[in-house]
Amino acid sequence: MYITEKDNPGIEALREKTSKLTSSPGCYLMKDRTGKIIYVGKAKNLKNRVSSYFRRGQDHLPKVWKMVSLVDDYDFIVTDSEFEALLLECSLIKQYSPKYNILLKDDKGYCYIRVSDEEFPRLTAVLQKEEDGAHYIGPYISSFTVRQAVSEANSVFKLPTCTKKFPRDIGKGRPCLNNHIDKCMGVCKGGITAEEYRETVRQAVEYIKNGSKASVERLTEQMNAAAEQLDFEQAAVLRDRINAISRAADRQKIVTDSGRDMDIFAISENSGQVCGSVLMYRDGRLFDKYTAMLGLSDEPARMRESFITSFYSQRDDIPPQLLLDEPIEDTELIERFLSEKADRKVKISVPQRGAPLRLTMLSKSNASEQLSLKVGRSGREIAALEELAKALALEKPPRFIECYDISNFGSSDMTCGMVVYENGRPRKDFYRKFSIKTLAEQNDYGAMSEAIQRRFKRFFDGEDEGFSTLPDLILLDGGKGHVNTITPIVRSMGITVPIFGLVKDSKHRTRAAAAGDREISLSAYKKAFALVTAIQDEVHRYAVSYTRAKHSKNAFAVSLTKVKGIGEKKAAKLMSGFKTRAALEAADEAALAQTAGLSEQTAHELYIFLHGGEDE
């Protein structure tokens, strides 16, 4: 999107001011017409960076375009280094909370672990502490940690989580599934006294408060004491509980056995919105997570960088290692910023394989799931588009995807189908059919060329809503030949949309994406592969169904010429006027005569023919 004088009447004055700006590092503060600061940024070269906002013909993302359209003036502060500019930027963002910067608001409330006050107490996670006689453990800042701890304790100690009330419901009804799969001790069956149950709850609370190591040591002492007293049944119960605690601890460890502290950052984008996620690991365990909506889409590297600096501007707990799902531009600068804040070295890396890569994918999945609640799409759909963007090296996940396929019966009834997917879902009201008009013989390249040219001519005409949206990605059912034929045509029309071919294997299944003289395997991107396969299957179904319908219609039109007085032209008029066979059969003789200019006798004979009379 380009900024013009119509969008911002003061753009020329801003360009003039920027032409005299220093090339030193520093910060710039964009202001609206009221003088309010709406954006703060840093730059190692102020003139180059600020000029990029106001330059003629500069293509901006929607978020940046909106911000620039509101800028009435700007201030700047020169610093001695880019690092000082970064520190100043963080300080100014805290001070002014500009509208167009990423502003992370920590809206977490306190969370408690509630031990109910009853004969058979229950463990639950709650957000409010009430005067109800229950025992509350906390407060905790992380609701995620509290829910995880309660779930783990209930599982390890086999405490009931059903809605039954004890002792009222003991002996009533059958035990639940959790008891059958040994996930619940089965209080409802009887045989467990209130004293035994409360002792188990006490051990669960101790486990939550002191951790698995201390609990194992305490339970081991109790198990040995029970064995010495020849209470082997109690010793076996304690042994099983120790094993359950050990298994639970193992499940919480990251797949590598390093046990290091680290934070894993990822962002997810869909429908122009961006969500960030941080998974925090401490001592090799998933300790907490944080997700935040980051606003409208911007340059991915810059958004990750801003997300990291904003996140740690509010926190002092900085681990020695950060993992990112994608690179940022100023890695060394951010490492220095975090190292000085943490008073020790902090390392940033983008893992490419193994366990660390799986952790970044987990963080990205969390961001996708959170974003799905905002934009009304499933996490899987969002992840598929992000994987597709990564596989095809696109700047951002494609919102609108158009896919084309040619279908024909030999040299007759040549058609092209166009299907549209918006945010990973079919947009059927935008589907379009093309009947190939300029070719007498079968020529898939020529047919595709005609359809594409007609599609973008309609885009420039702006008369059809289905053609009015410029796609973010064009897929062609075909290999490198289709891409090499269509790309020059599209580029000559001033369209810069990425174009890829979809290559099938010998069994007519999607195998790879073709671009120029190379093929890109999609097998490593499972969600993207599934999406592309679905798109290719859909466009093939759509194109073939149109070809069959057209062929059937043409065959029926030829059959009309059997009626005396009807030639090819009048048959064509009839089909054009009534569109379908059903509509033609429903017409009376007067309508038939008027539509194709038939005599009363010919219309009568046609009516008999359509309704299975002798003349047929």
Image (spheres, rainbow, N blue to C red):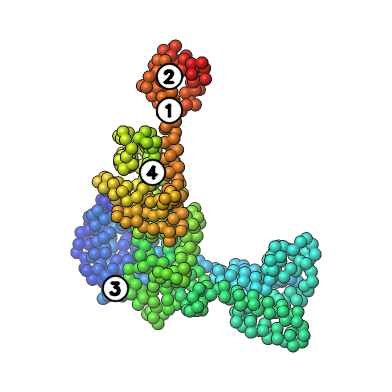
- Of discs 4 and 2, which sits in the foreground? 2
Q: How far apart are marks 4 and 2 (CA)?
A: 35 Å
Does label 1 or label 4 sit earlier along the sequence? 4
Residue beneath disc 1: 555
Contact between marks 4 and 3 (CB within 8 A): the answer is no
**Percent of width and height locating residue 364:** 46, 64
- Rendered residue at 48%/16% (across/down): 615
**Percent of width and height locating residue 189:** 78, 67
Residue beneath disc 2: 562
Does label 2 or label 1 sit earlier along the sequence? 1
Q: How far apart are marks 2 and 1 (CA)?
A: 12 Å
Q: How crowded is mark 1: few (under 14 residues within 10 Å), some or many (20 or more)?
A: few
Q: Distance between the residues labelled 4 and 3?
A: 51 Å
- Of discs 3 and 1, which sits in the foreground? 1
- Rendered residue at 31%/68% (across/down): 42
* Viewer can see residue 125: yes
In the picture, the disc for residue 82 is 3
Does label 3 or label 1 sit earlier along the sequence? 3
- For badge 3, the amino acid type reads Glu
- Rendered residue at 35%/61% (across/down): 299
- For badge 2, the amino acid type reads Lys
